[in-house]
Amino acid sequence: MLAALAAIPAALLPSRFWSRYPTLQIERFALASALLTVLLGFAVAIVGYFEFLRSGGASVGALYAPIVFGLTTPTGLLATYLILSGIFRTATSFVGDWYGDPLLTAIVTAATSTRERRRDTAARADRVRREGREVPDRLYSGEWASLPQAEYVVVASRRKEEWEAGVAVITSDKTYRLGAPFDKETREGLRTIYPLLPYEHGTVIRRSIAYELPPLRER
């Protein structure tokens, strides 16, 4: 009983949060939560509708009174939402696609997305500040970056899209396999290091990037 009392309202939370409360077994009571939402909606509708009629709603006519009540009054809108959202959650529960309250889920999703966008924007701005001004790529030997397994390393002042570990880097002279990129603090700012490893013959090229190597630098 105590588990149900806690799990039924908890099932209104966005379903991605349910796993945070394993002891409540929210999925077990999700259907009950949805059905109770429907019943609550009908209870609100019945009480509110008769109050609507007593306050003059009957003047709109018996045919249109329920529609006016359900779509234009605060109590009617609440009842309509509870009923429809409860029916939706009930229907989806039968196929194992669990949902919390749709409106609460939408609000939380929007707030989370906004927070993540702000965090990502702040992180990008901080990285650009640390990188300093954008300059052309530089090429050094693998030993320069303490990577003897790499023939060369490309030092970039900005991250390169699609330059991920395993990608084939095709130059005019040779093909290399890109190692795992990493960041390195330098006197000129933060730099991204891209190791160019020997490409083994016979290896299937799944993704490739055409690139012209800059002049090799000693220091």
Image (cartoon, rainbow, N blue to C red):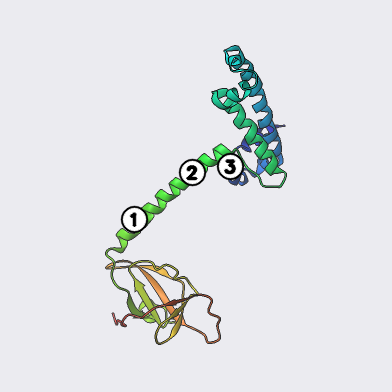
Q: Position of residue 77 (x, y in %)?
A: 57, 27
Nearer the N terminus, badge 1 or badge 2?
A: 2
Nearer the N terminus, badge 3 or badge 1?
A: 3
> Which amino acid does the dot numbered 1 rest on?
Ala
> Which amino acid does the dot numbered 2 rest on?
Ala
Query: How many numbered marks, from 0 up?
Result: 3
Q: Which residue was labeled with disc 1?
A: 125
Q: Residue at x 69, y 28 (%)?
A: 39
Nearer the N terminus, badge 2 or badge 3?
A: 3
Asked whether the viewer can see residue 77, the reply is yes
Q: Position of residue 211 (x, y in %)?
A: 39, 78
Q: Which residue was labeled with disc 3?
A: 14
Q: Which residue was labeled with disc 2?
A: 110
Disc 2 to disc 3, how far (Cα)?
A: 12 Å
- Does 175 sit left or right of 67 as displayed? left
- Give the vertical position of 12 relative to 65 (above or below): below
Q: Quadrant of residue 20?
A: top right
- Does 63 sit left or right of 184 as displayed? right
> Which amino acid does the dot numbered 3 rest on?
Pro
- Give the vertical position of 68 relative to 148 (above or below): above
Q: Residues within 10 Å of mark 3 (few under 14, many from 20)?
A: many
Q: Judging from the image, what secondary structure is the residue with disc 2 in?
A: helix
Q: Nearer the viewer, residue 212 or 21?
A: 212
Q: Quadrant of residue 123?
A: bottom left
Quadrant housing the C terminus: bottom left
Q: Position of residue 140 (x, y in %)?
A: 34, 80
Q: Judging from the image, what secondary structure is the residue with disc 1 in?
A: helix
Q: Residues within 10 Å of mark 1 (few under 14, many from 20)?
A: few
- Does 176 sit left or right of 184 as displayed? right
